[in-house]
Amino acid sequence: MDFSPAVTTLIVLGIVSLLFVTEIVPLAISAMGGAIVLGVLGIIPMKMVFSGLSNSTVVLFAGMFVIGASMFHTGLAQKLGESVVRIMGTNENALMFGTMFIAAAISSVSSNTGTTAALMPVIIGICKAAKIPASRQLMPLAFGAGLGGIITLVGTPPNIIAAGALKAAGERPFGFFEFAWIGIPLTIAGIAYMMFIGKRMLPKVEISEDVEYDKEAMEEATAFTDDPSKMWITAATLLGVVVVMALDLKSFPLEVAAVIGAIVCILTKCLTEKQAYTGIDWVTIFLFAGMMPIATAMETSGAGKLIADAVVSILGANPSPMFVTAVLFALSGGLTQFMSNTACTALLAPIGISIAKGLGASPHAVMMAIAVAASCAFATPVGTPPNTLVLGPGGYKFNDYVKAGTGLVVVCFIVSLIVIPLVWPFFPAK
């Protein structure tokens, strides 16, 4: 049977999607495999199959992973967390605010998983001293890390993938702090929700001393040098990189700033070369690199237009961009509860852009909704690594996440539908 390039691309995308959801094979292999198949079938040129690995976005992400790792290896992240939480005291509400605030702040420029792993022993120790069940604070810790990741371009993989997809489609990519317009309101709303409503859904579990921790993650997070000079070097380096990125200098690209920062951290021995390589999330790197050619194939083969036309026809002759954005937010938010948020964004990004173009609307609002929703993996323990990390130490059950997290997802949905169209209009003035 002879399929058109568009149909062939959709079949490959469907198989990759199935592999993403089931994770029968590793995510990175699924993405790279999809790109290879499209190259072999002639849908994209063979030279494009691995082109994603040389993408400037991949370099940016790698650099920031190294700087983030330096924060943990020098003990900077742990010290920041301990200081803020201790200042807030041992009152349950105050402690929850301090926990979520510092988790959001640190994860905005570093790994959500690393932030959670680094702060977890601090929170557990303070809860023990204050005679507060750790189950009352660890889930808010994971949620705070997830919310904070939305604030900057490098805070979480979905943001970088959304920006990359826009750039690949010939659109203006999101700026470094552009995500803060939605990330900060979501973080404030999320903290308020957990302090006044979500906390009522949290269990009071007394954990025994022999509770099962994710030992590897804990050991990695707590193994730091505790050298003040290296902490200061890392802090200054991070601040310098963020300032340069915020200025958005045309002569000094984001990826160059990130790589220079990473090099400084290694040369000053804030972390070793091996620790730098280990600090890079290679799954994210290869997943992104693999999905870039697939996204290109969606555009060039007409597969994206095919999906967009189908969705638009289902939604009606003149669907409201707001309704389309709400539907894509719900779709992304639903998928991310059970699959990688990175894979979810990479999957929906080209589809969202095609649908927006089909409506004659700016794709920025749609892309922002998809990326934000992908980071709202609060309703299951498997939606995002921070949730999984606190599962054992918090003594949580699957339904505990459903109870506390579903409301938070709804809050994020409502806030997003209010803020996103205001900041990124569907039909911006020319």
Image (tube, rainbow, N blue to C red):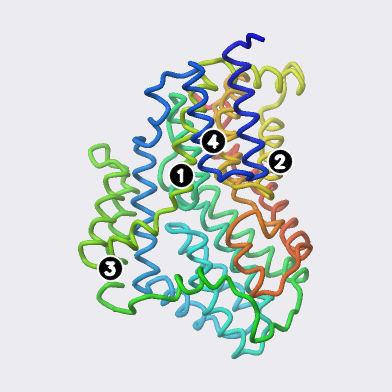
Determine which quarter of the picture holds residue 210: bottom right
Q: Which mark is residue 178?
A: 1
Image x and y of residue 212, in percent: 63, 76
Name which of mark 2 and mark 4 comes first in the sequence. Answer: 2
Q: Which mark is residue 330?
A: 2
Name which of mark 1 and mark 2 comes first in the sequence. Answer: 1
Report, in whole angstroms, how far the alpha carbon at label 1 lies from the one at label 2. 22 Å
- Identified by mark 3, the residue type is Cys
Q: Is residue 82 left or right of residue 60?
A: right
Q: Is residue 356 left or right of residue 272?
A: right
- Identified by mark 4, the residue type is Trp
The answer to whether marks 1 and 3 mark residues whose Cβ atoms lie closer than 8 Å is no
Image x and y of residue 157, in percent: 49, 47
Name which of mark 1 and mark 3 comes first in the sequence. Answer: 1
Q: Residues within 10 Å of mark 4 (few under 14, many from 20)?
A: some
The answer to whether marks 4 and 3 mark residues whose Cβ atoms lie closer than 8 Å is no
Q: Which mark is residue 204?
A: none
- Identified by mark 2, the residue type is Ala
* Quadrant into which the N terminus falls: top right
- Identified by mark 1, the residue type is Glu
- For disc 3, the marked residue is 270
- For disc 4, the marked residue is 424
